[in-house]
Image (cartoon, rainbow, N blue to C red):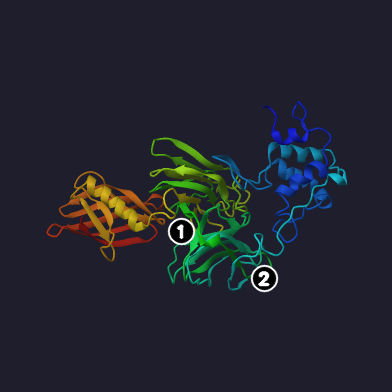
Amino acid sequence: MWFRRGLWAAGVLTACGAVSAEVTYTKDVAPIINANCVQCHRPGQMAPMSLTSYDEVRPWAKKVREMVSEKKMPPWHAVQHVGTFVNDRSLTDDEIATVISWIDQGAPRGKPRDMPAAPEYPDGEWTLGEPDMVITLAPKEIPADGPDVFDRIPGKAALPEDRWISAVEILPGDKRVVHHVIVYQIHGFDFDPQGGWMGAWAAGTDPMVFPEGTGRMLGKGANLIGDMHWHPCGEAVTDQTRIGLHFAKDNKVEKELVNLWIAAYDFLIPAGHPNYQVRSQFTFPQDAFVLGFAPHMHFRGKDFTYTAHYPDGRSEQLLRVENYDFNWQTNYVLDEGVPMPKGTTIECVAHFDNSADNPVNPDPTRDVPFANESYDEMMIGFVDYVVADGVRPKSADELRAEYRETMLAAHPGEVWGLYTKDKVNPAPFYLPRQGDGKIVLRVNGSITELGVYDIVWNGNDFTSRVPLGEIGDCTLNGTLDPATGDLNATLAGPHDINVAFKGYRL
């Protein structure tokens, strides 16, 4: 069919594809604005103006035309992807044509009887309604000017039992200064950003409602911590952020929704570079389904692509985001999960514009590293997934044991178990006298099998190289005691990596 369903049904397309003269606010435009704009453009929300009525929209008509025609509003930057997104807020070509035609015709009001009912939102501050539990963080004084402010503020949960969380809504105290909030759970002083991730808020994000049947576990006795980032707004203010938790019905879910960080940390964007590329990747150790994406960069981010490389040799682009905008941290939530067979690698590729042609570049004259400050950069491909079998992913110990059995079967007598404190569930290490080896380590929160290259033996001493993905190359050097078969080894590399291992022959 050559026509597009939305406008054909409304009777506003001619055979040439042009919008007819009969376009009014009440009949044709109000339904589009109510469905796609009013959630943010209403009193008390983050948008700079309210668009809940004709009288509010009309003065902004030219600006609306500009933002809609350039697809800057509503903010949605996915241009290629698999499947469909349940939270797709982009306008169709037909809707864009309708809005533009209405404004070009002088923005007529239309008949009052054609005006649709206004959308309804929950009473009170919380978009999702009153949470089952509210955790209030300590207040933070933010100065009127100066550098960005960072802090980690704990909040007490201390539930008497494990509870599955079905949704998380984060309510900043003052959205003028809060740039983002990332919420983790902590047990004592155990801070694990990936294993303890609960939810996040940034400009452009909706409350995190997890897909039906999924949830994240808040452990018995655990507390939360808000990883906070503020930027001064020209006025000294006090922010006090609250975290609202919604519990899963009957404390049951079918699958744990796991948040994965496919991140690159070891990069430096040269001053003035207009299109610097950074890559990161992750390989699934068991069958899984991907349910969502959230690419994250700062002001120099241009585009971000997720590609799946399957074990059978196929490759598929999962999501491509163009014209990335740091002001809109969008979660792209799939309607159906995309299968990731064991051994599938997701590769993330990002490009950065550090040139003077980038109008939001804080400083095109400096080399830019990975760091927390907004004027530095990040490259993180967030992914939400569930495992195919069971409720939760296999534990680190289970994965190490699987790798160990496979490695021993393939290379008997040439596999050692490396450990730092005790010999329970050691990291398997295949160390041949000739050729390349393998080692299983925890990298970026995941158990991963890595290649060991350039192995050189000098008697019972050895040197080798271990690429730790986006972290960079490390050296793994050590000594073998031929009498006992024991190893002493040290892994050293970027970001102050320096880990001493002991090992025994398996």
Pointer 1 residue: 194
Residue occupying the point 60% across, 66% down = 132
Going by the picture, which residue comes out furthest to the left? Answer: 483
State the separation of the CA atoms marked 1 and 2: 33 Å
Which element type, helix, strand or loop, lies under badge 2? loop
Image coordinates for residue 449, horizontal then vertical, percent: 33, 49
Please indicate whether residue 70 sits to the left or right of residue 183 in the image.
right
346 shown above or below 393: above
Locate residue 42: give its quadrant. Answer: bottom right
Relative to 332, residue 419 above or below: below
Task: Give the x, y percent position of residue 394.
Answer: 38, 54
Looking at the image, which residue is at 21% across and 48% down?
Answer: 432
* Quadrant in which the N terminus is drawn: top right
- Residue at the disc numbered 2: 236
Name the amino acid type tagged 2.
Answer: Ala
Instruction: Tell me where residue 467 appears, x and y as whole percent.
Output: 34, 49
